[in-house]
Amino acid sequence: MSITMKKAVIAVRVSSTKQGLVGDSPEDQKMLLEKLAITLNAKALKVFKFVQSASGDIQPNQEAIDYCKNHKVDYFLIKSIDRFTRGGAYYYEFLKSQLTKYGVQLVDAYGIVGRQTINTLDHLDIEYKWSRYSPTKNSEMLEAERAKDEVRDILTRMIGAEIRYTRLGYAVSVSYTHLDVYKRQGQENYLNYLRVGFLIFQSLPVY
């Protein structure tokens, strides 16, 4: 007896072109999720690649979710919750609830998002909307908040260092390949290049 193959959407995201080059590239995420699809006996209908931050009001994965609304999809595959959104628990619940509404299961490669739901009234053969829940929901929410907090930590380190250098007399600016820190010397305001090799400063932003 043949087993019907499920259908999946793969969503990969990096916040900047540089992040995609130095680590966690879209291709690495894609390869990981294609293997995950095989374990789920699913075929990827479409692969979405986003090079965009997911910490604000505009959530790039909304485009992929809208695709699921108009197509028969069983699984929505992501590497991890922070690749899905950096907007915290609110945006995570908002995006995931749409997938649930469309009958799509969100699956992450790290196994944080549970695929099992429990009906607390199952022994009575009764089910209400409130009686069915996901045992991993709290863990998912905590991970979504951690992803949001990480953005603040990154920006605090980056902006804090820029403030310190500015107070030391440097003018900070960003180039495409590195952070240039210029120090004014004398009355001529001569700009002397001083390249600072902190990886965290090499592009804005990294989240």
Image: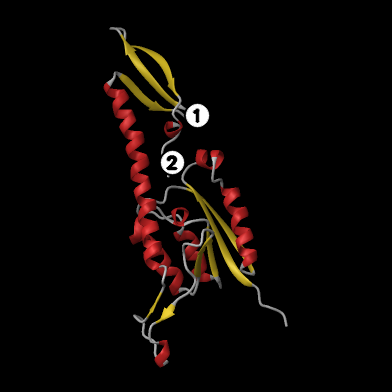
Q: Amino acid at mark 1?
A: Thr
Where does residue 127 sit, x and y in percent of width and height?
39, 87
- Relative to 130, say whether 161 is above or below: above
Left or right: residue 168 compared with residue 108: left
Where does residue 80 sit, x and y in percent of width and height?
49, 56
Disc 1 designates what residue?
Answer: 177
Q: Secondary structure at mark 1?
A: loop
Q: Residue 108, labelled with which disc?
A: none
Q: Residue at x 29, y 18 (%)?
A: 169
Q: Dot 1, crowdedness within 10 Å: few (<14), some or many (≥20)?
A: few
Q: Amino acid at mark 2?
A: Val
Q: Quick one: label 1 or label 2, which is nearer the N terminus?
A: 1
Left or right: residue 143 compared with residue 22: left
Q: Nearer the viewer, residue 52 or 3?
A: 3
Disc 2 designates what residue?
Answer: 206
- Relative to 175, say whether 82 is above or below: below
Q: Residue at x 72, y 80 (%)?
A: 2
Where does residue 108 sit, x and y in percent of width and height?
51, 61
